[in-house]
Image (cartoon, helix red, strand yellow):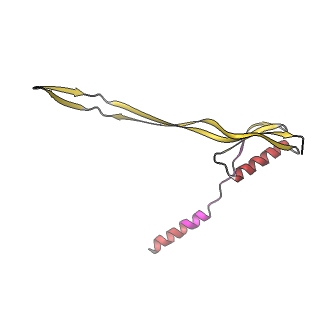
């Protein structure tokens, strides 16, 4: 019992000491001192948005940042597939007094699951109004 309690305390302490996730934002497109597009993971965190804001301000220098559009964008697909072979069946049926063999061949079965990959994109421009 004491070992289980110590194990629980160690796991709890380890979780409390885990580093927070790092903020993520990347530049998709950038025109220096003019405009750009920033992408964030879905779902994004407040740290992600703060990093995106600092990247936009850095590109615009002293100019104000004007967000033109932001929203979810499809960036690709992730497909997972599975294939297996089903063994054919052999049956013997009787047609009156004559045996009839019915053989079904082996079958290849496949299945695919496709998921759309999405990210949040922010389209902005640098405006001369501060």
Corner quadrant of residue 34: top right
**What residue is rendered at 71% in x and 53% in y?**
47
Q: Position of residue 43 (x, y in %)?
A: 64, 48
- In this orientation, which residue lies closer to the viewer: 77 or 26? 77
Residue 93 magenta-highlighted:
no
Image: 38 above or below 108: below
Quadrant where the N terminus is found in the figure? bottom left
Instruction: Specify whether 72 is left or right of 10.
Output: right
Q: Position of residue 107 (x, y in %)?
A: 34, 30
Corner quadrant of residue 19: bottom right
Which range of residues does the magenta coloring cover? 11-26
**What residue is rendered at 82% in x and 42% in y?**
66
**What residue is rendered at 51% in x and 72% in y?**
6
Query: Which residue ends up furthest to the bottom in the rendered image?
Result: 2
Image: 96 above or below 112: above
Image: 110 above or below 62: above
**What residue is rendered at 68% in x and 52% in y?**
45
- Marks counted in the figure total 0
């Amino acid at each position: 019992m004491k070992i289980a309690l110590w194990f629980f305390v160690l796991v709890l302490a380890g979780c409390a000491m885990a580093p927070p996730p790092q903020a993520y934002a990347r530049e998709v497109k950038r025109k220096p001192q003019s405009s750009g597009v920033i992408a964030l993971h879905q779902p994004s965190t407040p740290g992600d948005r703060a990093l995106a804001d600092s990247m936009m301000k850095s590109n615009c220098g002293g100019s104000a940042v004007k967000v033109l559009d932001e929203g979810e964008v499809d960036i690709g697909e992730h497909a997972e597939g599975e294939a297996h072979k089903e063994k054919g069946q052999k049956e013997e049926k009787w047609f009156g007094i004559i045996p009839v063999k019915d053989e079904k061949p082996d079958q290849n079965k496949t299945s695919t699951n496709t998921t759309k990959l999405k990210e949040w994109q922010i389209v902005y421009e640098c405006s001369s109004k501060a």
